Structures are given as C-alpha cells and as structure tokens.
Amino acid sequence: MRFRHKVAAGLATLVLPLAGLVGLASPAPAATAQAAGVTASFTKSSDWGTGFGGQWTIKNAGSASISSWTVEWDFPSGTSVTSAWDADVTNSGNHWTAKNKSYNGTIAPGASVSFGFNGAGPGSPGNCTLNGGSCDGTTAPGDSAPSAPGTPTASGITDTSVQLSWSAATDDKGVKNYDVLRDGKVVATVTTTSYTDTGLTAGSDYSYSVQARDTADQTGPASAAVSVHTTGGSTTPPPPGGKVKLGYFTDWGIYARNYNVKNLVTSGSAAKITHINYAFGNVTGGKCAIGDSYADYDKAFTADQSVNGTADTWDQPLRGNFNQLRELKAKYPNLKVIWSFGGWTWSGGFADAAKDPAGFAQSCYDLVNDPRWADVFDGIDIDWEYPNNCGLTCDTSGPEAFKNVMAALRAKFGSGKLVTAAVTADGSDGGKIDSADYSGAAQYVDWYNVMTYDFFGAWDAKGPTAPHSPLTSYSGIPKAGFTTADAIAKYKAAGVPASKLLIGIGFYGRGWTGVTQDAPGGTATGPAAGTYEQGIEDYKVLKSSCPVTGTVAGTAYAHCGSNWWSYDTPSTIAGKMSWAKTQGLGGAFFWEFSGDTSDGELVNAISSNL
C-alpha cells in the first residue's frame, strides 16, 4: 500500500521453556520445593538479530507463600547470557541457573516477581524447571517433561485421509502417549508413534505436529510440523458471485483507531467480502518476518472486543489479531485470509529477497504455516513498492527480480494456496509498470491488486489540486498515464489477463489547504490537516466534515473553506465497479476497512455493485 502507520507494540510472550537471563551469581537461599500453582514464564521484549532482551516472571497462583525460587534451563550451543537484574545467574556449560535476590525471594499467593536480562545469540532455552519442578506449576520436583518427538512423516495421502508416523520422544520416567495436532489443535491421543487422520476435505491444506505426554501427565514441546495437501478437489474455488471482493485489515488499526476484527462483523462488512489481506508482515534480511508480534498474536482482547464474545486468557495458545481472524473464519467459513508482506515502509527488504528467491519463499512458507496459526491463512500477498524502481527507497534488483520471487513463492506454496501481489498503477510511458516483468510473473499469481489511488496528493504541497484516484483522464490532469484506466490498459496490453487484475479503492481522501478554487487545478499552500497524518483523512470523517461539491474523472472532490479534498463515495464506487465489470476484471480491493463508516457503506457499495 502507498502508506503505512507503524505502531511499536512488540511483546512476544512465550510461556514456559524460553529465553535466557544473566549475570554473575552470589550465594542465595536454597530453593524450596515447588508449590502447586507456581509458574515461570518468559516475555521477549526486544530482538536485535545477534541478541535479545526480556524478562522472566514467577507467579504464585497457589494458596501458600513461597520463600525463595530457582529457575533453571538449557541453552543450545552458541547462545549465552550477558547481563541480568533482579536475579543471580550462573551457568555450567549450556545449563543456566537463576536464583532470587535477598529482596524478592518471598512470593505471596496471587503475587508475582520478575527479573530481566540481555542475551546473546539466536537460540531459545529448553528443559525449564522452577524449584526443581515444572515451570507450569503442575509437576513434582525432579520429573522433567518429555522431549519433542520427531517431525511427522506423511504417507498414504488420499482425498480424505493421511497416514502419519514419527520417531519417539524421550523422558526420564517414560512416555505414556502422544497428542496429534492438526493445524495446532489436538485431534487424537495415541500410545503408538503413528496415526491415520480421516474425515478430511479433498484438495485442502493441513499442518500436523505431535507432542508427548509422560507418566506424570507432563506435556512436552510440539515437534516441527509437516504440511499435507489432500488429493482431489479444486485448487482455488471461485468466490461467491464470481468476483473477488478484498479488503486490507491493518495490524496497527487496533491501537489509536480502535478498529478490531470484530468491527468487520458489527459493520456487516464480513458478510459482503470474499477475502482479507492482513497487513503487514515484515521483509528483512531476505526473509519474511513478524511485523508486530503484540498485535499479531499476543494482545489479549476483552469479551466486548472479541468476535466470539469470549475474553482472551493469559495462558491460551494464540491471542491477538490472528486468533480473532480464526474466530472470524469460524463465523464466515467461506472467507479467505491472506497475509500481506512488505508495504511502503518494509519494501526495502525485497532487494535481499530477490538475491535468493527460494530462500525467501521458504522463510515465508514456514512463517505463514507456523503450527500456531497455520489454519488462519489461505495464502500470501507481496506488496513490493516498487520492483526495480523507486518508492520509499530505490530498488535496483533488475526487471526479472519480481517474476523470480513470485515464481519461487508459487513453487513453494503450491496450487492449494493463494499467491497474490499489490502492484503499481503508474501507466505513464516509461513508468513503474515498465520497470518489472509483471506479465511474466502473472502466470504465478492468482491476481494483482492494482493500487489505483494515490496518483496525486499534497506531497506536491503547492498543487495543483487533483483527485488522488481518477478513473479516467481529464482536461488539466497533472500527469498523463496517472489514471485507473491507463494502468489497467497497460497491464492488459502487456498480456496480463483481465481476470487477474483487481481495481483498487481508497477508503480515504487526500487534500490541500490554502485553496481558493473549487475545481481541480487550483494552487495550495500545503497539506490539509488530518487526524493521523497531514494531507490524508478517512472517508467516514470527510463525508460530514467536507461534503462533496463536484465530481471529475469518475471520482469526487470537495471544497470547504480553504481545504480541498478528493475521495470516493458510494456513488463513485458504483461507477467504478460498473467500469470494472465492462473491463472483465477479477474484482476489487480496498485500503482499508477502518476508513469506512460504522455500518460499512463503502464495502456495501463495492459488494452490491460488483
């Protein structure tokens, strides 16, 4: 997308065996035996590639006080701890021990204490113990949890079943049974190292992992996951009504905008769309990465904020927007969710991705299909602004880079997942469409989201005023080729099928101030004031604060006082949808949900007219 508001909110909480802490130890009181209900959990607060920071929290949910605590764990080779506070930490090789200070050993029922650290290296700890027992507060001292079983192997795949087998886990007291997890949820418990899962859907994707339980009913870590695609079925079923109706949901919208996944339900929008693009995942170091871990999978939503009306709990496996999207899909089974990576701010990472397309595709596949949320996402979207051209920064990866990346993604994700891309709408001669092989890449994508908005705006502070999303050209347009019609025509002329092109709609306006002329083409003194950013404002605000005074080139404009805005309305959207149908386009998409009214009138205009 053309713009991105980045909100830093990253707390990636991982309960039980996790990261390291540190320092040099001094003698501390001997740890008491672990009381029931006393737990140790780790929160990762930062990660700078070669190291990380965070804190452990020891919580007493039991009925009796404890007088001291000791947390122990193992680090893999190459990971160590460098400094710590509020704990004394020592190590023997890769085994680390943290003991309470004199002032924080006693923890009353219902209370908790924390200590922090800085660590070096990329590894995560295992074999966590608290006062000699399990860090989850359920096991007796001296009894460790089982190891992770081997990654399952899939065989005998049919339309509706798959045979799974795995190597055994180990445990000091013996393994009792195994939980088989499909898409992160337990579907069976068996005593052997094999299982046949039945009742599956033909032509569908599943992710399987396994976790062991010992004779003390301790559950160990899950194995790595194996992906399975059942035979039969079709690849990507046509959406209801035959046209794609896609909207972007932004991870940062849950902050200042207070726009949650539940708003898609209350506005009626979820029932009128076919797809959601979740924006954004990061692209860094040539790989796909989490964008905002707190918003994505950690934020606890209250009951009134939640799609299913149930509040998140501190210990549930998945929270945040990902869990809310899972709940939304349960309510609307035909709705598809695509994870979008890049965007204006994070497009710089694609230059490294283009150097190793296969490695990039593998990283994206692993992240999208992480067992914690594999059932949430139906594909991947690439928002590279712009291949072999300039956006926030200038990319020189070459005209074939975009095609190579899309080919690698399709090869890795296969035919059962959606692979899409947001692409430029610069239809000028020698413009951005001419910089990359969008035609060659089209064979690998399900569709292109053509960003037919932001053609003009107050980055040209003095004007001339012009609509930011003209459908067609008009007399006095500041730059030839900067229209929806020109962009679509150029893609079609290059050989991109019309059915793989989606028209884009902005749910916002762009505006100037210091304008005296009502018609487009006036001079200005700078950007008009906006709620979150100068020169830009949501439709839901503009429809009342600066009502439409005219239309030009298939879109609307408004002159109120000294401000001049352009934006789309239900009426102009109806006209654009009609035009899209005459062009044989695959549908429409929009940026983004939170700019619409509380009753979703712009979404309704797209849906009802497409």
Image: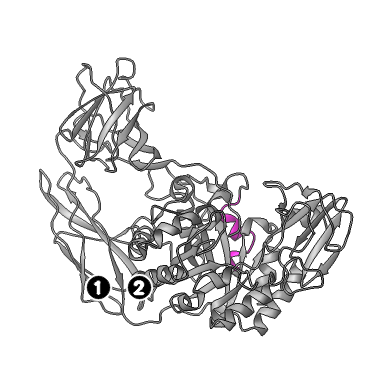
Q: Which residue is mark 2?
A: 411
Q: How is the image coloured?
A: one colour
Q: Position of residue 89 (x, y in %)?
A: 25, 25
Alpha-carbon distance for marks 1 and 2?
A: 22 Å
Q: Quadrant of residue 233?
A: bottom left
How dense is the environment of label 1, judged by Cα within 10 Å: few (below 14), some, or many (20 and up)?
A: many
Residue 274 in view here:
no
Task: Examine the rendered structure and indicate whether residue 602 appears above or below residue 214.
Answer: below
Q: Nearer the viewer, residue 384 or 382?
A: 384
Q: Who's the residue at 77% across and 62% down the image?
A: 466
- The reply to whether the magenta stretch includes residue 269 is yes
Q: Who's the residue at 39% across and 26% down the image?
A: 111
Task: Examine the rendered structure and indicate whether residue 239 appears above or below residue 345.
Answer: below
- The reply to whether the magenta stretch includes residue 136 is no
Location of the C terminus (image quadrant): bottom right
Task: Examine the rendered structure and indicate whether residue 503 appears above or below residue 455.
Answer: below
Judged from the image, the secondary structure of the residue bearing numbered disc 2 is helix
Residue 578 in view here:
yes
Q: Quadrant of residue 596?
A: bottom right
Q: Who's the residue at 31% across and 64% down the image?
A: 207
* Amino acid at pointer 2: Ala
Considering only order in the chain, which callout, 2 or 1, is on the residue closer to the N terminus?
1
Q: Position of residue 478 (x, y in %)?
A: 76, 65
Q: Which residues are magenta?
A: 259-271
Q: Position of residue 54 (x, y in %)?
A: 37, 34
Q: Which residue is mark 1?
A: 162
